[in-house]
Amino acid sequence: MKTLFILNDPPYGTERSYNALRLAGAVAKREGQEVRVFLMGDASACAKAGQTVPQGFYNLGRMLRVVAQHQGQIGVCGSCMDARGLLDAELVEGTRRSSLEELTDWTLWADRVLDLYAAEPGPMGVAGPAVSAGVRQIVESKGVRYHPEHQVTKVEPEAKKLAFANGAEATYDVLVYVPPHRAPAVIRQSVLVGETGWASVDRGTLETRFPSVFAIGDVVTIPLTMGKPLPKAGVFAHRQAEVVAANIMRAWSGSGKPRAFDGHGECFLETGDGRAGFGTGNFYAEPTPQVALKSPSRWWHWGKVLLEWRWLRQYF
């Protein structure tokens, strides 16, 4: 079997690179196994010679040598080395400067790769072609093969086979499958649901066709001018809830101004390696949503961490 490990995390501070190299070393020792390791981003520092660590602590330089001693190949991203001032002469024995081109060759060489099959023409299509192309580039830069317009019609667990609406088929070793989304039974069986199978609401007030009855979040569908529905996301449910709550208080008290949900929202896009992208914009804009995607950075990753911490601290 041919196995490729792609590492992005720094050598110390997290245990991701450590655990990956533990597994790479264990696989390399098995008979009939071929292993290749590619270090990119902060993981390129794993290959720096002369690492000194406290007694009893793991040493990633030594772990790389174990892989190399069992005929494993280890490449280090050249541009990542240059960005960090890491010279070829400073690399651990058994590792060498490599390139994205070689990583591409190794990805195709490996027996086990990650394939992402999606029903839509592109990821985050509702955000527009530029954002969709940017997200796809991020996905594929991680060595993931993206297959658009592949709607799953059948899963055969015993044969480990997938069938798609376009006539294509694929086999798998491990399957992570997201089933078709639908509203909960209590909603589907109620009078709130329209032909779409979701609750229909006024896009500004979130009021259903029944006066003073509101629906928010994932149980509703809000069609956009471009023909796609508003994405189902926590940020929208949160802001819709604020609008509904404010309008109910106004109806009870008789004071205050009416509020309307304006379609603005944002989300973080985790890319690994301690980085995240950030998409933000107006999904109600016409003729198409106006959404911008910020490039992945540690800033946005920690922004997501702090946002989650604030919410957990507030309610738990």
Image: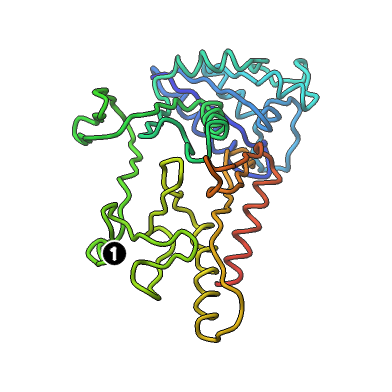
Q: Answer above or below: position of 109 versus 170.
A: above
| Number of residue marks | 1
Q: Does 86 sit left or right of 171 as displayed?
A: right
Specify the quadrant of the image occupied by residue 221: bottom left
Q: From this viewpoint, which residue is outermost toward the right?
A: 85
Specify the quadrant of the image occupied by residue 296: top right
Q: Does 27 sit left or right of 280 as displayed?
A: left
- Rendered location of residue 164, percent (x, y): 26, 29
Q: Answer above or below: position of 75 versus 207.
A: above
In this rendered view, identify the residue nearer to me: 192 or 121: 192
In this rendered view, identify the residue nearer to me: 134 or 199: 199
Residue at horizontal 68 percent and vertical 27 percent from the top: 44
Few, some or many C-alpha atoms within 10 Å of disc 1 (few <14, some 14-19, many ≥20)?
some
Q: Does 284 sit left or right of 65 as displayed?
A: left
Q: From this viewpoint, which residue is outermost toward the bottom?
A: 253
What amino acid type should be assigned to the residue bearing mark 1?
Ile
The quadrant the C terminus occupies is bottom right
Q: How is the image coloured?
A: rainbow
Specify the quadrant of the image occupied by residue 93: top right
In this rendered view, identify the residue nearer to me: 125 or 73: 125
- Rendered location of residue 133, percent (x, y): 54, 29
Q: Answer above or below: position of 36 versus 315.
A: above
Identify residue for label 1: 187
Q: Answer above or below: position of 315 versus 287.
A: below
Residue at horizontal 25 percent and vertical 61 percent from the top: 188
The quadrant the N terminus occupies is top left
| SS at mark 1 in the image | helix
- Rendered location of residue 176, percent (x, y): 35, 40
Residue at horizontal 62 percent and vertical 40 percent from the top: 292
